[in-house]
Image (cartoon, rainbow, N blue to C red):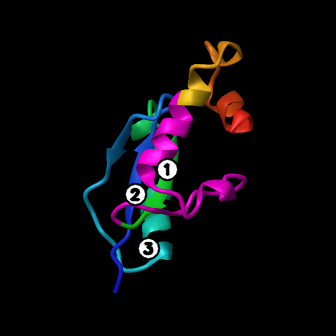
Amino acid sequence: MKKYKVICMSLDGEYKEQSPRFETIEETSKYANDLGPKWYSYPFDLICTEKTVVSAGYGLYHLEGKRIKTIAKYFKEVSERPEMQGCNAEEFYFAL
């Protein structure tokens, strides 16, 4: 059976991998929902297998099925756009 994990990604594509692994996406999602403000600097939680995103959350379905490193590069590219300088997580979300 697959093992799922949560990664928390910042606007510039840096990410932190959470150590617990789960058997189901539902268990992993519940864990991600309970992280709270602990990861304020890493506002995007992505549910992944070892290298691939399987659940990105509402409105970010286009990220699902892509490699973590590909998404990190995409986040970095978006964050470097001139119009994204000084934006908050909500503005960044809409730019994705």
Distance between the alpha carbons at the discs numbered 1 and 2:
6 Å
Q: Is residue 75 left or right of residue 20?
A: right
Q: Is residue 34 visible?
A: no
Q: Label 1 crowding class (10 Å Cα cut-off): few <14, some 14-19, many 20+? A: many
Q: Dots 1 and 2: beta carbons under 8 Å? A: yes
- Amino acid at circle 3: Glu
Q: Which residues are magenta?
A: 50-76
Front: mark 2 or 3: 2
Residue 59 in the magenta stretch? The answer is yes
Please tell me which residue lies in front, 17 or 79: 79
Which residue is pictured at 39% across the width and 39% down the height? 38
Near mark 3 (Cα within 10 A), the count class, few <14, some 14-19 or many ≥20, is few
Q: Quadrant of residue 52?
A: bottom left
Residue lying farthest bottom?
1
Quarter of the view holding residue 75? top right
Residue 89 sits inside the magenta stretch: no
Q: Look at label 1 and name its amino acid.
A: Asp
Q: Are marks 3 and 1 in contact (CB under 8 Å)?
A: no
- Kindly identify which numbered label has been placed on residue 6: 2
**SS of the residue under disc 1:** strand
Label 1 belongs to which residue?
A: 45
Q: Residues within 10 Å of mark 2 (few under 14, many from 20)?
A: many
Q: Is residue 28 above or below residue 6?
A: below
**Picture quadrant where residue 5 is located:** bottom left
